[in-house]
Image (cartoon, helix red, strand yellow):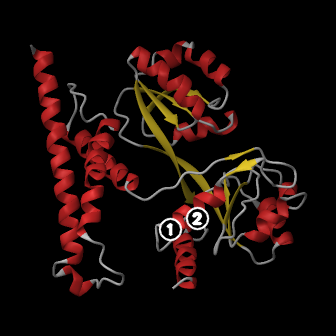
Amino acid sequence: MLRRYNRLLVACYVIADLLSAAAAFLLAYFIRFDSWFVEFVPVTKTQPPFSQYLYSLPVIALLVPAAFQLQGLYRLRRGRTRVDDFFAVLVGSLLAVLAGVATVGARRCGGGLSGGTYLSNVAEAARLAGSLDPDLILLEGSGAAVPPLRADRTVLVTSAHRPAAALTAGLGPVGVLRSDLVVITMAEHGCVDTREAIEAVAPGRATVAVTLRPSPAEPLGDGSVAFFTTAPPERASGLAERLEADVVAVVPALSDRQALREALARDDVAAAGTFLVEVKAAAIEVVCEYAAEHGIRVVFCDNVPEPTDGEPDLDAALLELASEAVALRA
């Protein structure tokens, strides 16, 4: 009887969130285009027809309950405080907003010594993104392949742990020369060699040295935590120390499926009540499946770049590049 009541209560929550999300989405349209708000922030482009918003309404309405489900808001459990609920709703709402950003996925396969790829649909994805008529297109890539596109502004991300010679030999200079800004991660112990290599290739190129701070997607609570990260063993413990949680185990082998299976058999990992996991394919296939089978809570972890002492503001530098890119097409 109690279980049936809980299911009915969760269903009421989901329906209420669906209706609230739909109402907020429609209200945002009227506030933006048909209210006093227009006097303060004029509409600079053609007002989209209301019918377009109605077509998008079911998707937007479903995003909010989906994000709340990811945050565990529909799991009824004792010991949950109002503070926990507040932060879960906040993060869930942010996830729903981010999910509402128009996103076009692309893929590549292989990367040769010359920087080319065996197979890629990045150009087609960029054309599709352009057809949506956005003010700004953000192209995100990874790996050593050279993008088959030209961007108005480019940011190169490298690591202070990477040999500096990698930036001055082979295709290393290509990435530096294509960039308007170089972000140097893992620079908590300095990055003199990396900066000298960048200066040798592109004198005067702007750089920002940062450290990476692990940022859980939701509060970890007071229970024990096992932290799964892609960081190398020598850095993983330092990252765990920055977490405000009772970390009882650190597993740095997040890209190695066999090593993950061996780690899950350890007593300290199995005893953890929460798995804090960076998002990688191996993490989903091995760690999250194990957690689901054993009733262990999973919290995803982001890594937030923070400038080291004396470094420029990274957010301000990125926003400036974005403004410059938009101005070029105005």
Residue in view at x 54 percent, y 62 percent: 128
* Kind of residue indicated by mark 2: Arg
Relative to residue 169, is residue 20 drawn left or right? left
The answer to the question of whether label 1 and label 2 lie on touching residues, with beta carbons closer than 8 A, is yes
Relative to residue 97, is residue 191 drawn left or right? right
**Label 1 secondary element:** helix
Q: Position of residue 260 (x, y in %)?
A: 61, 22
* Kind of residue indicated by mark 1: Ser
Snapshot quadrant of residue 97: bottom left
Comparing 132 with 247, the one in front is 132
Residue in view at x 18 percent, y 71 percent: 30
Q: Mark 2 sits on what residue?
A: 127
Q: Mark 1 sits on what residue?
A: 131
Determine the residue located farthest toward the right in the rendered image: 169
**Label 2 secondary element:** helix
Snapshot quadrant of residue 42: bottom left
Residue in view at x 42 percent, y 14 percent: 294
> What is the C-alpha distance between the residues marked 1 and 2?
6 Å
Compared with 79, 27 (above or below) is below
Comparing 50 with 140, the one in front is 50
Query: On residue 170, which mark appears?
Result: none
Snapshot quadrant of residue 17: top left
Q: Position of residue 281 (x, y in %)?
A: 58, 33
Compared with 23, 155 (above or below) is below
